[in-house]
Image: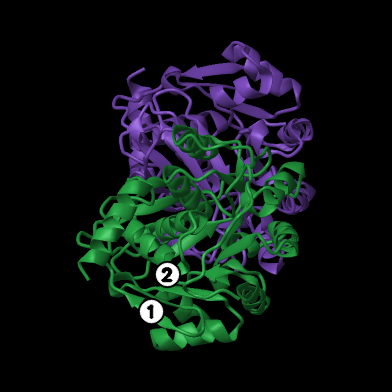
Chain colours: A purple, B green
Amino acid sequence: MSNLNCYYKFSNSKIDVVSFGEMLVDFISQKNEVLLSKAEEFTRHFGGSAANVTVNLRRLGVKTRLITRIGDDAFGHFLLDVLNKENINTNGIQIDQKRKTPLVFINKTAGTPAWVAYRAADKYLEFNEKVEYLIKNAKILYLTTFIISQNPARKVALKILNMIKENPKKLLAFDPCYRPSLWSDSKMGKSLVKKIIALSDFIKPSLDDAKIFFGTESPENYIDKYLQLGANIVILTMGKDGVLFSDGKTKIHLPSYADEVVDVTGAGDAFWAGFITAILDGMSVKKAVELGNITAVFKIRGIGALSPIPSKKHLIKFMKKQEASQ
Amino acid sequence: MSNLNCYYKFSNSKIDVVSFGEMLVDFISQKNEVLLSKAEEFTRHFGGSAANVTVNLRRLGVKTRLITRIGDDAFGHFLLDVLNKENINTNGIQIDQKRKTPLVFINKTAGTPAWVAYRAADKYLEFNEKVEYLIKNAKILYLTTFIISQNPARKVALKILNMIKENPKKLLAFDPCYRPSLWSDSKMGKSLVKKIIALSDFIKPSLDDAKIFFGTESPENYIDKYLQLGANIVILTMGKDGVLFSDGKTKIHLPSYADEVVDVTGAGDAFWAGFITAILDGMSVKKAVELGNITAVFKIRGIGALSPIPSKKHLIKFMKKQEASQ
């Protein structure tokens, strides 16, 4: 068990972070506040939480790999083009010759968007020597809930979870974004997500995630409920209301520093990238949450999940300025 | 065996035509002549050959049903909304609670478009009492190649083909649009399409279909090759070059009467609808091809597969005017 003032030391390793999860194409409605069944025009975007976290980590100078599976099709080629432009090592990316690149359709809205997911190659992610090598050489595993919702990918995820938990020096960062409709057996899904929460070093639910998981409660109660499941560090992101986080002893609230909200898509993924970068740098959990919070501020100033974020140096400078002004 | 001057008599029946095939959402790139992997914006359209033929038949006053399977999702709801607006009986439509509505992504081009198909609920079309009832009560079955490319839907298609062929009074109109990438075993696919061609009363390949099936040949050779496979009536649609059709004895060429080409999407489906309507009305095969040709002329004056077509009365008037001017 770690607390909010803990920091972590890592052995030297070829890889800092492996993200295990989805890379997909988001089709977002061009019109605002339109029902998905009425939306006529869509814009294609790079997406998938694991992929977004990977790109943001790379931008912050982290040695990162992505384990995912896409199709050998127009959309898969588009996603690979983005990774190549971002100078991301694509060693862990599996190309499925039979199945397509997964897609998610989303309506643009100020509220909680409606969405439809087309699962495809992602579900068929395989365990192979490359996956084994990457996991063995990583300091932190970032795992999404999307990828564990369907077999055979789920089985692979559980296998690498075992590999991570066998080695106490490796950390598990888990995004508990449970959505019943992604699971063929949603009860089993919820129970599995609970188990992984208990295994995790860090979880970062959003208010939506918590509401879907526990029903309507106060943010403080959400934190307590995650802790009761056995979570170690819980970071609840609350949009305009900032972040509430806890190690089970203390609860700390940080305001959102967002001055200019253009698009919140991928804000959580940018948060994760800033947070993980700080943990790798030996900052305390508390400082890491601050850096995550600040990284998200920059992301939401631009459109799309991959809108520009500043360098780590700039983020830390901004963080110190915020601290000094308090 | 029928010839081009043949016409057909049908027993009274509750249903004229059953279309067995795909209803799906076409996502067409907004920009012209852009690679599918580079296209950023897409517009959603009603699509699927069997569905387009059904809508056009209904507009021409034919008692028509569609046997297809879609998802219980935003896109399935959109497609059903269109059918309801067109006053189409949706008795034969199966709603899959687990799988999604199929999608096809297409780049807008003056040439042969690139496309990526997301197969989903369509593949899981089931044989049930409704399917049996509809086939038993139909005069003509319109069958697409898309739907036979994947099991379990293929098995259902073969079962209803048997039902149709057991009754010599029922006619089979088959669209031999063979695309190797839709089949898990493309050699088997080609061989199956050949067998169904031999069983069909009418086939209507396009030049693209013929080229993909036989390689580059002259239109006359394409007709001969289809006839050699055992086809009864072959109607080769050739875009701006009109239609070449044959019963094995005579080959007749009709020019395209198209004066205003706005969008050729679904032109073949409009052709089928005009052709089948004429056959049901007791016109000769030759006249029916003329009516099909004319129906397509009106379709391509508008955007989308479902652009307006005139009433049957108007189409026949237009046909008589064309004949008088020759």
Q: Which mark is residue B178?
A: none
Q: Which mark is residue B286?
A: 2
Using residue B166 as the reference point, say whether residue A301 is left or right of it: left
Q: Is residue A150 visible?
A: no
Q: Which residue is mark 1?
A: B252
Asked if the residues shown at circle 1 and circle 2 are in contact, with their CB atoms under 8 angstroms apart, the answer is yes
Specify the quadrant of the image occupied by residue B143.
Answer: bottom right
Nearer to me, A138 or A19: A19
Quick check: A176 above or below B195?
Answer: above
| Residue at 56% over, 63% down | B173
Using residue A172 as the reference point, say whether residue A299 is left or right of it: left
Quick check: B242 above or below B40?
Answer: below
Residue A270: x %, y % from top left: 45, 39
* Amino acid, disc 1: Ile
Density class for disc 2 (Cα within 10 Å; few <14, some 14-19, many ≥20) is many
Chain identifier of the residue bearing label 1 in the image = B
Residue B308: x %, y % from top left: 32, 45
Nearer to me, A3 or B177: B177
Using residue B301 as the reference point, say whether residue A134 is left or right of it: right
